[in-house]
């Protein structure tokens, strides 16, 4: 069974140089053939091959599925009251993480699974076809392992974040907690984790602790990602670059040396899985929800840094699963053009996960895409808050239909 998407007004491929729009590789009046979960062919609609099934896009825009490379979906409870207090003037410090840890530990597996499933489905309806899911609200050997086991039921992009904060029971002996993370907790996480992450920030883990944890995780075969420079300037971004991290995330408070370090990692993308580029992943939902100043993406882009956008979906600092919302915020608040933001939310996310089979539409890539209820990708920023994702194909299979 193959499937032809015909009558595409604007096809965003993210294959640079093959059409209009530079990196977006836009083709007009196009068609795209899907077979065995992959893109089998794409080209001018007038040359479209015959197919078993056909979707008429009606002149609408089609783009690669969003790649949300940063999300914390395994948790229980919510923190709406904390959000409400922030909107009345309280500052975000990350202190509420421990509230979610207590609720998560008390929840049974099915409750956690239900939350991940609900948020995963919510994201898919908004065009997210790949999502990274972190642990980090268990913070015990048993609860981190089960968080990752449940995450792995929903994605292959699982991240061990045992070093999210030091849990209350280790508050006066953080070195012991780092020892636990590097030893028994890492061993329990390994069967389910692809990546390791640390919240490197004042009040969470300093550079020495973060380096120790990330290095031991890397030696065990995990890829590195870092929560860096979110609440203030700090060593996280440069540590990530030093360790060859796939991504440093947040990047809200950067100095020139941080930006130079990131720019120095940019390589030609011959093979993305072998890349040594460290992507700067920006999470504007967190600035929105914590009422914090947004990072200036323009500074990064003008320096040549590879930028990704992700939701940071979590109950504390950014309770949104919506990549279109993040695209709109990035354009309005972070000085990205709509083209840069859409690229960052698709191809950028793929690079942050060192994947070359997603975030792009070319023969052989995964048939992960959205059909918009709009003639152009521009509308994602131009019409914020409007449900523009009309159909989603995930692995070539229609996932959400009106
Ligand atoms: O990425 N910064 C650390 N972790 C999350 C927030 C977690 C929470 O507040 O529950 C983040 O923003
Ligand atoms: Fe996060």
Image (cartoon, rainbow, N blue to C red):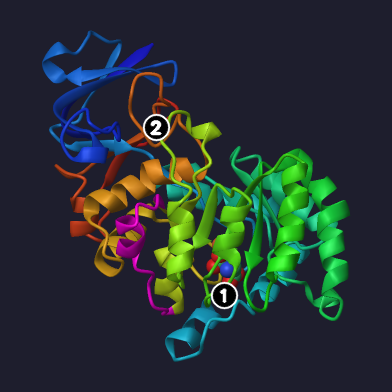
Residue annotated with mark 2: 368
Q: Residue at x 44, y 60 (%)?
A: 260
Position of 2 with respect to 283 (left or right) is left
* Quarter in which the N terminus is drawn: top left
Position of 16 with respect to 400 (left or right) is left
Residue annotated with mark 1: 79
Q: Residue 20 lies in what quarter of the image?
A: top left
Mark 1 is surrounded, within 10 Å at the Cα level, by few (under 14), some (14 to 19) or many (20 or more) other residues, namely: some
Q: How many marks?
A: 2
> What secondary structure is marked by label 2?
loop
Compared with residue 378, is residue 89 higher up or lower down, i.e. above or below? Answer: below
Query: Could you tell me if residue 312 is visible in this image?
Result: no
Start and end of the magenta stretch? 291-307
Compared with residue 264, is residue 177 higher up or lower down, i.e. above or below? Answer: below
Query: Could you tell me if residue 220 is visible in this image?
Result: yes
From the image, state whether disc 1 or disc 2 is nearer to you.
2
């Amino acid at each position: 069974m193959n499937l032809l998407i015909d009558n595409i007004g604007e096809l965003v491929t993210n294959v640079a140089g093959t059409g209009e729009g530079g990196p977006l590789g836009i083709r007009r009046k196009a068609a795209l053939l899907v077979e065995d979960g992959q893109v089998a062919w794409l080209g001018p609609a007038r040359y479209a091959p015959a197919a078993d099934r056909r979707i008429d896009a009606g002149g609408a825009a089609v783009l690669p599925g969003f790649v949300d490379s940063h999300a914390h979906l395994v948790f229980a409870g919510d923190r709406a009251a904390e959000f409400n207090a922030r909107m009345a003037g309280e500052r975000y410090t990350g202190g509420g993480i421990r509230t979610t840890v207590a609720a998560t530990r008390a929840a049974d597996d099915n409750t956690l699974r239900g939350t991940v499933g609900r948020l995963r489905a919510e994201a898919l309806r908004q065009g997210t076809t790949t999502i990274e899911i972190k642990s980090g609200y268990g913070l015990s050997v048993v609860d981190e392992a089960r968080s990752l086991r449940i995450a792995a039921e929903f994605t292959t992009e699982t991240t061990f974040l045992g070093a999210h904060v030091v849990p209350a029971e280790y508050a006066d002996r953080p070195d012991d907690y780092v020892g636990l993370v590097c030893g028994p907790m890492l061993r329990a996480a390994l069967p389910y984790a692809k990546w390791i992450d640390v919240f490197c920030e004042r009040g969470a883990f300093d550079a020495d602790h973060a380096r120790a944890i990330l290095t031991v995780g890397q030696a065990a075969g995990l890829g590195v990602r870092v929560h860096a420079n979110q609440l203030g300037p700090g060593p996280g971004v440069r540590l990530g670059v030093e360790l060859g991290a796939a991504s440093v995330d947040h990047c809200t408070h950067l100095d020139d040396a941080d930006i130079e370090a990131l720019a120095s990692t940019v390589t030609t993308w011959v093979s993305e899985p072998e890349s040594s580029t460290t992507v700067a992943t920006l999470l504007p939902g967190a600035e929105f929800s914590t009422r914090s100043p947004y990072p200036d993406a323009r500074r990064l882009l003008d320096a040549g840094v590879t930028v990704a956008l992700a939701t940071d979906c979590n109950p504390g600092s950014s309770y949104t699963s919506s990549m279109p919302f993040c695209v709109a915020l990035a354009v309005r608040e972070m000085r990205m053009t709509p083209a840069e933001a859409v690229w960052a939310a698709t191809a950028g996310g793929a690079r942050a996960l060192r994947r070359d089979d997603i975030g792009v539409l070319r023969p052989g890539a995964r048939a992960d895409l959205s059909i918009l209820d709009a003639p152009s990708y521009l509308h994602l920023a131009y019409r914020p808050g409007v449900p523009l994702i009309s159909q989603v194909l995930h692995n070539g299979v229609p996932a959400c239909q009106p």
